[in-house]
Image (cartoon, rainbow, N blue to C red):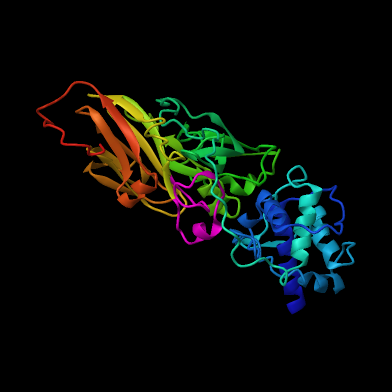
Amino acid sequence: MKSTVKFLVLALLLAAFVSACGSSSQAAPASDKTYTEAEVLAAFEKGTCGTCHSIPGVPNAKGVIGPDLSDAAMAQEHLNGGSYTGSAKTTEEYIRESILKPDIFVSPSCPTGVCPSGVMPASMSDILNDDEINAIVSYLNGLPDGAYGASAAPAATQAPTTGTDIVRDPADLPAPIGDREPTTVRLDLEAVEVEGQLADGTTYTYWTFNSQVPGPFFRVRVGDTIEVHMKNSTTSIMNHSVDFHAVTGPGGGAVMTQTKPGEETMFTAQALNPGLYVYHCATPMVADHIANGMYGLILVEPEGGLPAVDREFYVMQGEIYTNGAFGEQGHQMSDTTKLLNEDPEYFVFNGAVGAITDQKPLTANVGETVRIFFGVGGPNFTSSFHVIGEIFDRVFDQASLTAAPLTDVQTTLVPPGGAAMVEFKLEVPGRFILVDHALARLQRGLAGYLIVEGGEAPEIFNGTPSGDSGH
């Protein structure tokens, strides 16, 4: 029994290692070359191995999806056992074979139960070259004795970096549906991994739906059938998927959309319940995929649609866990230890610092009624959503559109994976600040602007500004 358990652990270890670090069908056997620490760490970083695994001596490699890759000597027991079907004769060959021929090592069991089809990423021979695979094999073959020190040398200060704009404009959402009969609506999603602009001088590798954070805002009506097409870019390293909270069915569609790079999956589902729902990637480690930007909202309008308003906006809150401290420039990697400890460096609206302040603020006019579709991707923190200087006339709490709304609300709680719809009329001009009223998060990037233009209304608000209030 112990031997069987060890084999399953080892099989999962090696198969999951492949899922994080990729494979190459052309990698050459290791030579006598000695790899430097920098070369080895660069190979692990390029393969994003630490996303799923804890690897001794490799900074930020604290993943929990795959087992700890700390002792490759376990391979010898499998080699000597009767269940091994590969061709390796040595531990080093065994490790290499697990990268080149992962199907030999795939276990039927994953940490969360039976492995769903397609949960392991496809071959990444275009990502890791022969030399990088050799560096990884050489290092793992030397564990545990050959592990680098517990703390690697601190990274040198980086120069400012520039990346792609990943911010979704809060005004980027489809028009109301109105009163129509149910129909079939096609929803197209593509997982794209992109080096995006997190803050001034700071970039981050986002995992996105359709190259922006949050993903596209979808709008259907109750009774519609949604036909979801989930693509994964050929440039992706990881598998990706989607879980719609609006879907009634296992995994919200995630069981049908575990999608390898370069492939496409599809499923259909009927929208049974009206409401405003989160969707997100649901590929292990789910929290990691969400923290990297893979979340969005879908509105299921009730029969007859929603009451008309002058302007609608789409805002989502999330956290980002970087290895560098808040404000540190250069390209930042994700830090799994901080993620698991729920210790983010950044809190953001729509994906980045300044996303809806300097870059793409909300704009409206005095006398208009606005509606904000607000959601929390998370993955860990509840939002106390508040607009400084305004009062919500109506709050559709927990995004329930069939219950009577709350009225005259100052702040509303929205949990991770949850949403709310708020409405209010604009009586006076000015700059109104969107915040999470856990206000320390303001200092970590979490703010937005609603800029309202129009005539003054001294009977409602009057006085002389006193200094720089920041509003």
- Tell me if residue 433 is in the magenta stretch: no
Residue 284 in which image quadrant: bottom right
Residue 307 in which image quadrant: top left
Quarter in which the C terminus is drawn: top left
Identify the residue shown where x is 22% and y is 27%. Answer: 429
- On the question of residue 249 being in view, the answer is no
In the rendered view, tell whether residue 17 sits above or below residue 9: above
Residue furthest left as drawn: 459
In the rendered view, tell whether residue 251 sits above or below residue 315: below
In the rendered structure, the answer to whether residue 134 lies left or right of residue 296 reads: right
In the rendered view, tell whether residue 24 sits above or below residue 161: below
Total of numbered circles in the picture? 0
Q: Nearer the viewer, residue 144 or 167?
A: 144
Q: Position of residue 188 (x, y in %)?
A: 58, 32
Residue 268 in which image quadrant: top right
Dominant SS in magenta? loop
Tell me the magenta residue range: 318-345
Q: Position of residue 397 (x, y in %)?
A: 32, 45
Identify the residue shown where x is 47% and y is 33%. Answer: 168
Q: Nearer the viewer, residue 175 or 444?
A: 444
In the rendered structure, the answer to whether residue 334 lies left or right of residue 81 reads: left
Identify the residue shown where x is 44% and y is 36%. Answer: 300
Identify the residue shown where x is 51% and y is 49%. Answer: 291
- Tell me if residue 327 is in the magenta stretch: yes
Q: Nearer the viewer, residue 25 or 404?
A: 25
Q: Position of residue 377 (x, y in %)?
A: 46, 46
Q: Position of residue 90 (x, y in %)?
A: 87, 67
Q: Nearer the viewer, residue 273 or 410?
A: 410
